[in-house]
Image (spheres, rainbow, N blue to C red):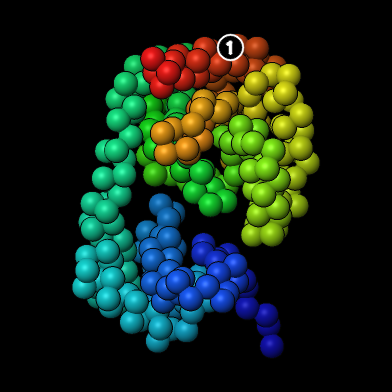
Amino acid sequence: MPRRSAVPRRVPAAFAEHAGDRQFATTLARGLEILRCFTPQQPVLSTAELAQRTGLPKPTVSRFTYTLSGMGYLQPDLPAGRYRLGPAVLSLGYPLIASFAFRQVVRPAMEALARQVSGSVSLGLRDRTNMVYVETCRSAATSSFQLSDIGMTHPIAATAIGRAHIAGCSPAERAALLNELRVKTPELWRQHAASVTQALAAFRDKGYCVSYGDLRPGIYALATPIGRLPSRELLVLNAVSPSWTRRAAQFEPTLAPLLLRCAHAIAAQFTA
């Protein structure tokens, strides 16, 4: 019989790290992870597709989708028998975004940098093995090209913003995170481990990390850690530009000083 093509999972297949923890509500966790299966590329999914991505039985997924739909977190996409995220997901995330009051204060500096790089500038925080954008600005020159947006996530190992986060961690945090990436994202780690090592070595001299199309061909990125929020989360600044705006040899010499200057200005907002 022909082998069925593997479907990349958006969520963990199990919660082994919580095995034996009686306080960990596995049923609740699995229900919440259903919501993480949806992406901009696949905003509508069937029960079978959700089962493939989570590793859960279809009857279990059906109960979760029924419950999540009743609470407004999913919307049935009738008559196809598929689902999409509901408005309740957005309303759930808004209080978190609104709590980052610094976003409005630092936005002018980010907008100025976005114009200078002819691309987009974002602030990101760690979300498990990914970085998630909590603020972003795009220049008019690339407004039709989706470089970034609030809520977008990118893998830590494959991106400049992720590598800058690693560089900004304490030695103990860094060792734990690198081990987590090896264990939980083995394919990405095998593909990008050498680049992560090179980025950390370069960071000691340059103060920033770089990516030349590692995640998306034709996209260049620079990133640097800014500092800790009151919640102790590490905030990272990211600047992204399409490769057609300037040659690779011009990218770092032209934009790195601008990125570091913007990061310094943003960091001053936290210490003022």
The answer to which quarter of the image holds residue 198 is top right
Q: Nearer the viewer, residue 265 or 252?
A: 265
Where does residue 254 sit, x and y in percent of width and height?
60, 11
Indicate the amino acid at tag 1.
Pro
Location of mark 1 (residue): 257
On the rendered structure, is 145 left or right of 211?
A: left
Is any atom of residue 247 visible in this view? no
The relative height of residue 154 versus residue 258 in the rendered view (above or below) is below
Residue in the image at 46% along x and 71% along y? 24
On the rendered structure, is 115 left or right of 196?
A: left
On the rendered structure, is 125 left or right of 66?
A: right
The answer to which quarter of the image holds residue 172 is top right
Number of numbered discs:
1
Q: Nearer the viewer, residue 127 or 240?
A: 127
Q: Secondary structure at mark 1?
A: helix
Where does residue 21 sit, x and y in percent of width and height?
52, 73
Where does residue 132 sit, x and y in percent of width and height?
46, 43
Residue in the image at 32% along x and 69% along y? 83
